[in-house]
Image (cartoon, rainbow, N blue to C red):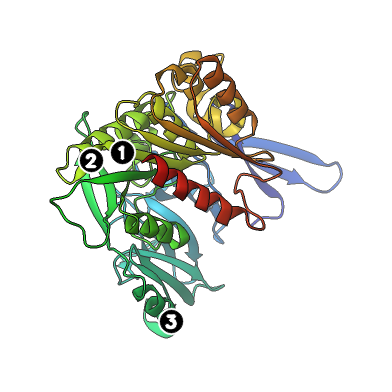
């Protein structure tokens, strides 16, 4: 806190659904003593995502904190007695990042998905006045880095088809200087005749509208039928359908499009920036609703007149590899080819803080763990399945793929396998990435 003898401690239970702020009063003179009291509590029927946005104000009486307690992620002001003074942001949209507070001016700065889940904009809001202004002007994705004192900020803007345009602004949003245009890169990109990434929506069988994007092959002909390559992630904490520059992944997808594939992606239930109910809908059943949404999406694409529904493939990394493995088994009648990189195959082997936030413990939720582990669905596999992992993966441990191999062999299912010795979760180093993406490209061309 702002006081030398008051320390605030954040405490959570193992289920991560009960949050407490403990105010500790320290008496530093002899005899030394500590007095602790609970000043704030928050509970959830699912889980609470903690953050590091706890800010104690100079008035010594209040603090700011992000919470999803009204169904969306917003910024609140509380007294040191834990009572809510005011909700500083509100609406059916999520704050994405809380940049901080200019206490001298009484202003907070943040980015949010107020426009929609695809875009990100920078805003300023008054604490005790009606100021509320969108500082970013260009549609797409905007992120800000503020100077100490919040007099200036650097805005990083991009959209799905345009690399970063970086500018310096004052705190009111007025342009001060263009720092980086990336014009040289834009001229280079024009030489490659890239296709436009297009956004669209589709409705799953539960009646939920989901966001998606598509990159069509150059000289696309709606009278022809094309194979489809579905790129996914699907897990909490990361969206793939955003109006921002995708860098090398975007360029790899352009390569696939130039090889004659329609490349698509979709954000299923459980993804970000659509409120707590949408994001927490996968609670205790990680993988279930997401897999259903990806299967629905595969069927939706297969029903398009310009798609060959016998040639729909799917690829993902980490949680996306987990989703790929479930889609190739539970969705074997939809997806004919799958590439799973560094997949979770059994939540019992993933780190407990992450897993238990969404699933609780295996002892409490054995059915949730087992029903959504691809090792228990390998008998359904029909198509071409490539499993890739780094043997020194420090995130999704190598054991996950070893277990998947054992299950596939027991089920007498043929599959393809490649391990990168001593590579971690990112599978970086030397020629590794070139080798990996060349292998994935060749596998796609040979099997899809």
| Residue placed under numbered mark 3 in the picture | 184
Rendered view: 88 above or below 73: below
Q: Residue furthest bottom?
A: 177
Q: Which image quarter: residue 139?
A: bottom left
Can the viewer see residue 114? yes
Marks 3 and 2 sit apart, C-alpha to C-alpha, by 38 Å
| Dot 2 alpha-carbon crowd within 10 angstroms: few under 14, some 14 to 19, many 20 or more | some
| Dot 1 alpha-carbon crowd within 10 angstroms: few under 14, some 14 to 19, many 20 or more | many
**Of 386 and 186, which appears nearest the observer?**
386
224 relative to 405 in the view: left or right: left
Are discs 1 and 3 less than 8 Å apart at CB? no
Q: Which image quarter: residue 287?
A: top left
**Of 110 and 311, which appears nearest the observer?**
311
Instruction: Residue 308: give its label.
Output: 2
Marks 2 and 1 sit apart, C-alpha to C-alpha, by 7 Å
| Chain-order first, disc 3 or disc 2 | 3
Secondary structure state at the residue bearing disc 1: strand
x, y (%) of residue 142? 39, 65
x, y (%) of residue 257? 33, 56
**Of 194 and 38, which appears nearest the observer?**
194
Secondary structure state at the residue bearing disc 3: helix
Residue at 48%, 47% (x, y): give it: 440
| Residue placed under numbered mark 1 in the picture | 312
Are discs 2 and 1 less than 8 Å apart at CB? yes
**Of 215 and 261, which appears nearest the observer?**
261
Rendered view: 337 above or below 84: above
Secondary structure state at the residue bearing disc 2: strand
């Amino acid at each position: 806190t702002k006081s030398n003898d008051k320390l605030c401690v954040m405490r959570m239970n193992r289920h991560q659904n009960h949050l407490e702020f403990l105010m500790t009063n320290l008496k530093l003179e002899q005899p030394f003593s500590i007095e602790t009291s609970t000043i704030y509590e928050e509970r959830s029927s699912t889980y609470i995502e903690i953050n590091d946005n706890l800010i104690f104000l100079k008035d010594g009486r209040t603090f700011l904190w992000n919470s999803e307690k009204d169904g969306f992620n917003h910024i609140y002001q509380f007294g040191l007695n834990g009572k809510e003074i005011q909700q500083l942001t509100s609406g059916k949209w999520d704050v994405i990042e809380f940049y901080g507070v200019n206490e001298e001016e009484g202003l907070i700065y943040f980015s949010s998905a107020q426009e929609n889940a695809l875009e990100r904009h920078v805003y300023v809001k008054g604490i005790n006045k009606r100021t509320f202004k969108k500082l970013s002007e260009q549609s797409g994705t905007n992120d800000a880095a503020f100077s100490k004192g919040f007099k200036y900020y650097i805005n990083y803007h991009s959209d799905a088809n345009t690399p970063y345009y970086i500018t310096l602004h004052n705190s009111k949003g007025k342009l001060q200087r263009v720092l980086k245009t990336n014009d040289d890169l834009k001229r280079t990109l024009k030489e490659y005749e890239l296709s436009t990434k297009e956004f669209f929506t589709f409705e799953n069988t539960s009646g939920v509208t989901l966001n998606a994007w598509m990159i069509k092959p150059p000289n696309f002909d709606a009278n022809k039928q094309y194979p489809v390559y579905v790129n996914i992630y699907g897990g909490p904490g990361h969206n793939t359908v955003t109006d921002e520059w995708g860098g090398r992944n975007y360029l790899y997808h352009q390569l696939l499009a130039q090889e004659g594939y329609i490349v698509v992606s979709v954000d299923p239930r459980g993804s970000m920036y659509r409120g707590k109910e949408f994001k927490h809908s996968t609670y205790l059943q990680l993988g279930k609703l997401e897999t259903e949404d990806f299967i629905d999406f595969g069927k939706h694409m297969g029903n398009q007149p310009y798609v060959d529904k016998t040639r729909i493939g799917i690829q993902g990394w980490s949680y996306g590899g987990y989703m790929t493995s479930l889609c190739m088994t539970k969705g074997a009648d939809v997806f004919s080819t799958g590439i799973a990189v560094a997949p979770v195959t059994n939540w019992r082997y993933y780190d407990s803080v992450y897993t238990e936030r969404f699933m609780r413990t295996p002892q409490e939720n054995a059915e949730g763990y087992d029903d959504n582990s691809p090792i228990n669905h390998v008998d359904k596999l029909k198509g071409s399945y490539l499993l890739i992992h780094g043997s020194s993966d420090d995130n999704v441990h190598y054991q996950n793929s070893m277990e998947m191999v054992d299950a596939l062999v027991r089920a007498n299912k043929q599959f393809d396998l490649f391990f990168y010795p001593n590579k971690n979760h990112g599978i970086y180093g030397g020629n590794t990435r070139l080798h990996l993406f060349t292998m994935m490209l060749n596998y796609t061309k040979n099997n899809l």
